[in-house]
Amino acid sequence: MSAQEKYDEAFIETFEIEKSDLTEKLEYQSIPAWDSVGHMALMAEIEEVFDIMLEMDDILEFGSYTTGRETLKKYDVEF
């Protein structure tokens, strides 16, 4: 499974959304499931899937589907 597929699956599983929902418009609090609790669940899933430990600043700045990819590049995740 590619990094992109893992990334997409983390969002789909955590938020129970469709692949078609994964757009640049998907941002923190743009859907009911992506609230503060959902955010922490997503971060835990991302850490598990990519076997990384996100820094607190990165968790706080992980504000959208698009910016999350940029954040993960700092952890050598290649898309």
Image (tube, rainbow, N blue to C red):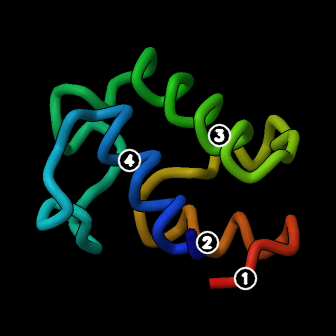
Compared to 22, does 52 lie above or below?
A: above
Query: Quick one: label 2 or label 3, which is nearer the N terminus?
Result: 2
Q: Quadrant of residue 20?
A: bottom left
Residue at 82%, 43% (x, y): give it. 54
- Label 1–label 2 contact, CB within 8 A: yes
Mark nearer the viewer, 4 or 2: 2
Q: CA distance from mark 1 to mark 3?
A: 21 Å
Q: Residue 3: give its label.
A: 2
Disc 3 marks a residue whose amino acid type is: Leu
The residue that label 1 is drawn on is 78
Disc 4 marks a residue whose amino acid type is: Phe
* Residue 76 pos. (x, y %): 86, 74
Which residue is more in the foreground, 2 or 67?
A: 2
* Residue 2 pos. (x, y %): 58, 75
Label 1 secondary element: loop
Q: How many marks?
A: 4
